[in-house]
Amino acid sequence: MLKYIIRRIIVAIPVLIGVSVLCFIIIQMAPGDFLDQLRINPAISKETIDKMTHQFGLDKPVVEQYFMWLKSAVTGNFGYSYSYRRPVSSLIWSRAYNTFILAITSLIFSWIIGIGLGIFSALHKYTAADHILTVLAFIGLATPAFFLGLILLYFAARTGTFPITGMTSVNHEHMTTIGKIVDILKHLFLPMLALGLIRLVGIMRQMRGQLLDVMHEDYVLFAVAKGMPRNVVIYKHALRNAINPLITMFGYALASLLSGALIIEIIFSWPGLGRLIYNALLEQDVYLVMGSLLISSAMLIGGNLVADILLAWADPRVRLR
Amino acid sequence: MGRKFLVIVFVLLLSAAISLAVETEYRVEPYHGQYGGTLINPSLGSGPKTLNPTVARETSSTDIIDRFLDFLIELDQYGTIQSEGRLAKSWDRLEGGKVWIFHLRKGVLWSDGVPFTADDVVWSFDKVWENPKIPSGGQDVIKDAEGNFPGVEKIDDYTVKFTLKMAFRPFLRSVGLTQILPKHVLAKSVEDGTFQQQWTVNDVDKIVGTGPFIPSEYVSGERVVLKRNPHYWRKDLDGKVLPYLDGEVFKIIADQNAILLAFESGEVDHMGPRSADYPRLRKEAVQKGFVVGLDGPTFGTQFFCFNFNTPDPVKRKWFRNEYFRKAVAYAFDKESVINTAYNGLADAQWSAVSAAAKYFYDPKVRKYPFNLNFARAMLKLGGFKLVGGDLVDKDGNPVKFIITTNSGNTVREDMCNILVEKLKQLGMDVTFAPQDFNSLVKKLLNTGDWEGLMIGLTGGVDPHSGSNVWKLDGDLHFWNYSPEKREYVKKQNDYYSPEWAKEIDTIYKQETTVSDEEAKVLFNKFQETVAEHLPLIYTVQQKYIYAYSKKVHNMAPTAFGGRIWNEYAIWKEK
Amino acid sequence: MKREENTAKNLEDSFERQYLSRTQLLLRAFKKSKLAIISFWVLVFFYIVAILAGFLSPYDPYVNELKSSYSPPTRIHFFYNGKFTAPYVFKTQTIINPLTYERSSAERLELASIRGRNNNKQFEFTKDKVAQIDLSIREIINAYTDDGKKVELSNKTKTVNNLLKNERGILTDKRVVRVYKDRYMIDAYRDSFDYGYKLQGLKVVKIVRIFTLDSIMVMTNDFNIHTISGSTVKIDNYTFKRYPIKFFIHSWRYHLLGIIPSTLHLFGTSDDSRVYLFGSDKFGRDVFTRILYGSRISLSIGLIGVAITFSLGLFLGGISGFYGGITDEALMRTTEIIMSIPGFYLLITLRAILPMDIPSTQIYLLLVIILSFIGWPSMSRVIRGMVLSIKKREFVEAAIALGLPKRRIIWKHILPNTTTYVIVAATLSIPGYILGEAGLSFLGLGIREPQSSWGLMLAQAQDTYVIAHAPWLLLPGFFIIVTVLAFNLLGDGLRDAFDPRSLGM
């Protein structure tokens, strides 16, 4: 098992280097650079701009710039952010952590609710409740993320039950540990809901379909025929087999959560990685973009690995090699 | 270790001794109030990037820097220089403006208790702002008309002398508004070349200033917390040492809609609403306890202009044709723009100087009220005629061009949209294609590959800030660069320099050496010349809107200082 | 999922199997899913509408009508003076209150004919004789303080050619009075630039606005102007101009199916009156028209995007799976790298670097290409896997043994076997493109004004002002939801239909 994990991590390294090369090429293709905002400022002379260009190494060849970055990435700095004037690594970890919290809670939320509703739907197949759930779930799927987010935001503002912006309260530092957790959960609720609702439907539909399929397998039919209690058949035998394909979905779910988080982060002012990338992109803060993209890619690869391990754990037929 | 400790004790004792010895010369402010409370400010966007004044370049950073760093002079809420300054109590202008002596406020302490002296001022200019290894926007501001830095010397602990190579009218405003940094904290970093890596957002615990609030906590992407500076140098009418507030918080909010909702639900204490939100807040004001109001225009200006050196020689001819530009000015439907893009909360602008710059603003310039018939008349005078509904020039070329603006700026896009439609009614074939800010800047400043443009520039109390824009060889004279400045103009071998442009150039060369009164006369002439010949066609200016909670007292919002310029005097009910 | 029904009809099925072709079987299986059938026809309807957008739109989607910004859906009248008539509208106008800056839209009633007496002299101007009727109205604004003092704030006349509905009284009573007692309006007067200085230091309890009719000016078709004094006139009868809704009228020019120039439209109104079925946007453009035009982009972006993604996926996946070796290795490593970057981040990174200074029609193409670029890696990996397994099947091995050219084997024998998967996957991935475009629009990276797309329109509606005062601008959201829903249900139905178990085989 450990061997497998180590092997996967080693395989991930060239992929991440590939990601960095690809990102660097893409970013270098963009017109203009970080200093463009200053160029149009009447108060700043061309000499000052030239000095800054030199200071940031923007006058060096592109290949050299890349290897400079790679060197600093190996030492753990991931380059230097122009606008923050700090190593990128010191900026992204806390943001990545926040995005991770948002993604993981909405993942758990959508899985618990999704699997629950999926089972319910499958067991009450073709009833009114099943149809209503299906329709609601599909509407959730069909709604653009930002639209759903804004509806929730307005709802929160109208009722005043949940805070609208950020991840913590202003006086967060002075709270007790339990108070801090409650504070974060309160702030987390709306963005988590927005992000979770979008993913919910996929899990629910998958669960429903899988369970229905498994229910027709011979061993289930046999168990029922033998007179085994319905609940035991469903929860002990059918469910365990039906859930496997969903675990495979886990890695992909993480990918889509990371992607979907950006818009939700902007709407709820959540201090996550997506907002950092987005702003860095707009400002052309090259290394900050690279660092953040790399971290999010690493999170994605990690998510896939976790999904594979989980699958091996849940399904004895799968062997990790 | 032991020795270090002794040194620290010694320094502390010394500073205590000095602070005891010198009585603080408090500046008395005309306020009453109560101690306590934390003011929560919204900060739009992604939050501060740095707290280092030589690095900061957007308001989310400078707003916070302004809280903890002071400068020598003091402005009132309309931007007028006051006789008693901040860190300088008074100053003398000698030798016709070539020598300035600043008398510093005595007994001012940095927030760590170390006394503030002339050494800090001399060091800040000599080693930071005038240091070629520390490039910053501020560096260009303090240079005189010929690009020289002023010389700085210390006379005694509380007197500093500035010597200039030439008289420079904007000197007091430029040097006087430059932040003074603590030498005892940062001197080492200048020597080892790491100055610009100091005072990043994560260094909040290292920051020392003379301002009313000092940063104490930074939560990435969420907020900056500032604490009251116990050593502040202002007092109120009752003799209470200011500031009143315990601290301030800047809450980072990514989106304007969210700021509005956060303000309505009490998560932030004040905001600058967009014009469309004004009626809504006005309606809620009584019930929810808001103060909502309007003020005059802001300092920035927005204008439409044509490229006199556009690649196509036929188009160049039109754009250089004054009647053509006047026709466009008459076709600019400002009232529709004001109603559509600004919900009625804007004013037409005709002058090159914002009406907010009260002293230098000239209201008597020529105006071009929306009138398509006047526009048609101007086109006729300019030699254009209509052929089957399409406008053609006197050589029969159909008038066809592209106008652009930076995409994402909805107000400018709205303005272009409205203008394009009116120009089409004049028979012009106009396309509107907004561009990315970055590629637009490149075309504007380097390649000259553009035709018509809607853009804005920041402005200030003194039109001197526009010298880079208006001088013929200015770096931002982008609509008509001189051949010396840009290769592409030289290649065209078709440089256009009309008399009036030279006149403006002369005005900008003269204004730095004369008195304010004489400069006012010169700038009036400048504004009238611009309005008459229209190199830039000015558009509209938004009215400044503010909204704050009734619990917050002593607020004095202005277009100049933002919603808060007197943060030391603000207090908040609990 | 429909299996028990199938087992019930098993006998019948085995009978039919011999007489039904595979297509017929598929169709039969598909028809069992009612939701999928409905979705299919909804989509067909949407696409037909999108193709005929020009003909169905009453107004040019790019022309502003600034007098009607944020106009709600126009009220269509079927009655005039209690009598049933053909549907008609009045002109509408958006007004910004100069005191409160509130925006409101109202019907402007223009006089079409007028009859009455002036100093006992009868006059009548009938509809066919009148060019325009102007009214000169005097407006007096008085403020009353708590000690009963009256302060005159304003006294001036204005000439108008239209009345608001609640001003109609001025024609019969020659006087309309409005009283404001609430603090909000009194404060608005106090804060205003024009009147504020007159109210300083006064405790105002009410503000009264009095409108009186000064005179009526009738311009007849022969350009004679008749002025009737407002103080002595007695109006017996008057009518307002009505603008009937006409069908199959000729107005603005468009290209039917993108080629045939035409000016014929399904419906519209005459002169510069407007009928907004779905209200208007900030620039007074017809939302109905813009939704129709936007549907062209939103509906086609998915189709074209999917076409590109799947051609790339099939081509590269096919090559990779069939040839193996270095080609396979290189392609798979590339897909791995692209798939390791979270899709939406890659999307905005790509969009941020690509030039914006191109016509908005080309931005559309650019978006499609970027969206496809994100999609092809996963597609080609799946195809590769399928090709690998199909390659081991006997018929392929036989084809190879026969010495058929490799290209022919890929195209004729291997790829056709992936069709079922491709059709289902394509249908289910179209919504991703539509939502992707909407997400980009939200970030300001999507389709550009003046072009419209559903995503852009919805993104522009994300504004506190719009949600509170112009909710009709959220309608594009409804269309996005319906379309995405329809594609999902259709895809589900197709998957069930293609499932061999449902075919009864």
Image (spheres, rainbow, N blue to C red):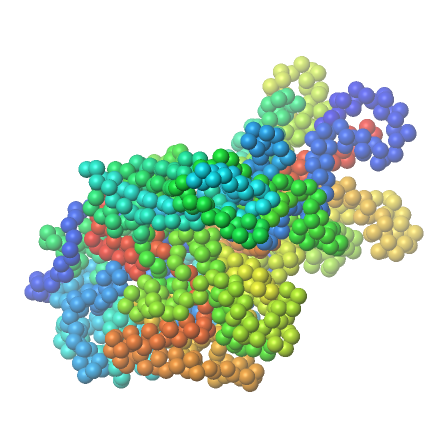
Q: Is residue C212 visible?
A: yes
Question: Residue most toward the left?
Answer: B21
Left/right placement of residue B380 relative to residue A170 reads: right
Question: Residue most toward the front?
Answer: C120
Location of residue A132 with respect to C410 vertically, above or below: above
Residue C341, given in percent of the width and then of the height, sits at: 57, 53
Residue C482, given in percent of the width and then of the height, sits at: 63, 37
Left/right placement of residue B191 relative to residue C478 reads: left
Q: Is residue A199 visible?
A: no
Residue A85, given in percent of the width and then of the height, sits at: 40, 64
Residue at image point 11% right, 62% down: B24
Residue at image point 33% right, 44% down: C140
Please tell me which residue lies in front, C106 or C314. Answer: C106
Please tell me which residue lies in front, B529 or A233. Answer: B529
Q: What is the quadrant of the N terminus of chain A in the image?
A: top right
Residue at image point 32% right, 57% down: B296
Residue at image point 24% right, 41% down: C150
Q: How many marks?
A: 0
Residue C325, given in percent of the width and then of the height, sits at: 75, 57
Please tell me which residue lies in front, C47 or B123. Answer: C47
Please tell me which residue lies in front, C182 or C110. Answer: C110
Q: Quadrant of residue B176?
A: bottom left
Question: Residue most toward the top?
Answer: A227
Question: Residue most toward the right?
Answer: C402
